[in-house]
Each structure stands twice: as C-alpha cells, then as structure tokens.
C-alpha cells in the first residue's frame, strides 16, 4: 500500500502542497480530483520522486521511500504515465515499450501480452516512430510503456486530456482491467469527473494545495465534489 502522510512540497519559496495525505491499495483505484493548478501533479511528482517533499513521509510496501531517488522507486515497482505522455518521438513503438525494461528486472525483459490485448493498435505499429502516432495512440503507448515495467503502483496524470472519446473508453477499460487483476494499486489524477467517478474506489479532492474532500466512491457527494472542480 502507498501511504502519503502529511506532506508539504515547495518549489523554491512557493509552497504547492500543505499537509496532504493519501492512501492507495492493491486492487483499487484512488482518484485525485481538482481544478488546474491546485497541486495534483505536484502530489504525483512527490510520489514518484520527481520532486522532494519539504516535510511529511511517503511509504510504499511498508518501507519509507521519502528520500529514495526516482530510479530506485521505479525499480521498487512505481510507474508513472505523465501528463503530456512524454514518449520518445524518434524511437519506434517497440523501442518506446522496451524502455520499461530498465525497471522490470532481468526476468521480465519482454513486452507483456496484456499491452497488446488492451491496445491492439500498438502491435500493428511496432515499427513506427512514436512521434508519428496520434495523441490518443501516444497515450496508449505511454500506458503500455508503464505496464512493461511490471509496476505494483501505477500513477496516471490526466490520461484523458486531449484524447478522442473512443480512446478515452479504451483507457477506462484498461484501467478497470488492471484493477481487476488485483496486482497493483492505481492513482489516477483527473479533471474529467465522470471518467474518474466511474473508475474510483476512493477519491481525494485538492484545492489550493490542500486536501478538502476524501472518501469512498459509495459515499461521494457528487455536487460537493463538482463544486471544487468548476471554475
């Protein structure tokens, strides 16, 4: 289980997070919701080790990883699908997927069949450069690359942003499938409320860098959550 406990995060003199706590469990999707600029991406950057926290602790699988480097966190089973996808445009689809081998371990240097079952278009494009794919295909590639790492914690930063509806449905089905296997915890940052609501087991809402709402999906007051998402 991931345990984020009372973290503060700064960028220089500017504070982005104030006392934020979050849990994520195997076999569940934890959705983080909020407007633009409220600290959602900063929280994910703290979880994966891209930005150090100023105070508080982060634990994964019973170990304190607060000061662990990003590459070590990746090897411990934490993978991110970043906002904007960040695939390698000059590498082929196959080569992009194979970059996940670095964190997968010596016995897992092959692309899991699940990647092509969930995103069959990638199998037909293995020789094409990543930069030649559409935005939706690049998002599928970014998720497939993370899956190649064999993560126990999958962190997704707004995977529906700028994506056509048909591929949003494919991404939702993929997240639901990965949850159903019970082998990973999933943290999903989203602004698309219906997408997040339909996938969430638990949810957390950020506003101005602070946690303002959290709970189980079954107890969610949709109107109250939507109020914190509207501009």
Image (cartoon, grey):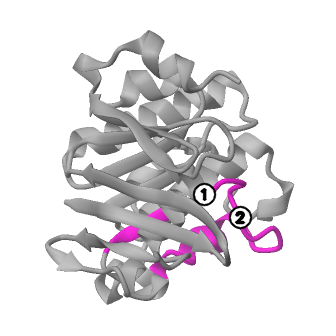
Q: What percent of the width, then of the height, locates residue 39?
A: 57, 52
* Circle nearer the viewer, 1 or 2: 2
In depth, the one of 166 and 199 nearer the eye is 199
| Residue at image point 47% right, 42% down | 118
Q: What percent of the width, then of the height, locates residue 137?
A: 70, 45
- CA gap between label 1 and label 2 equals 7 Å
Q: What percent of the width, then of the height, locates residue 8?
A: 45, 66
Label 2 element class? loop
Assign the N terminus to one quadrant of the image. Answer: bottom left
* Magenta stretch contains residue 94: yes
Badge 1 or badge 2: first in the primary sequence = 2
* Residue 142 marker: 1
In depth, the one of 124 and 129 nearer the eye is 129
Is 145 displayed left or right of 161 in the figure?
left
* Residue labelled with disc 2: 86
Assign the C terminus to one quadrant of the image. Answer: top right
The quadrant holding residue 19 is: bottom left
Q: Are marks 1 and 2 in contact (CB under 8 Å)?
A: yes
| Residue at image point 33% right, 38% down | 177
Label 1 element class? helix
* Magenta stretch contains residue 198: no
In depth, the one of 21 and 135 nearer the eye is 21
Q: Is residue 123 visible to us here?
A: no
Is 61 displayed left or right of 74 in the figure?
left
User: Which segment is the magenta one?
Assistant: 77-101
């Amino acid at each position: 289980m991931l345990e984020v406990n009372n973290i503060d995060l700064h960028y220089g003199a500017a504070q982005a997070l104030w006392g934020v706590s979050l849990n994520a469990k195997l076999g569940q999707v934890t959705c983080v919701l909020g407007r633009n600029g409220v600290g959602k991406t900063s929280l994910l950057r703290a979880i994966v080790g891209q930005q150090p926290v100023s105070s508080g602790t982060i634990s994964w699988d019973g170990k304190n990883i607060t000061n662990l480097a990003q590459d070590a966190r990746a090897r411990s089973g934490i993978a991110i699908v970043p906002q904007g996808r960040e695939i390698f445009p000059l590498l082929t689809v196959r080569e992009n997927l194979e970059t996940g081998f670095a964190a997968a371990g010596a016995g897992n240097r092959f692309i899991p069949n699940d990647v092509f079952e969930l995103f069959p278009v990638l199998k037909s494009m293995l020789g094409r450069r990543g930069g030649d794919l559409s935005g939706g295909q690049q998002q599928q590639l970014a998720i497939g690359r993370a899956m190649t790492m064999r993560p126990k914690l999958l962190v997704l930063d707004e995977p529906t942003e700028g994506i056509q509806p048909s591929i949003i449905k494919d991404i939702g089905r993929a997240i639901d499938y990965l949850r159903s296997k019970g082998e990973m915890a999933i943290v999903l940052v989203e602004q698309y409320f219906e997408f997040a609501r339909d996938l969430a087991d638990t949810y957390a809402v950020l506003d101005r860098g602070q946690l303002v709402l959290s709970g189980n999906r079954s107890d969610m007051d949709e109107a109250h959550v939507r109020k914190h998402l509207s501009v």
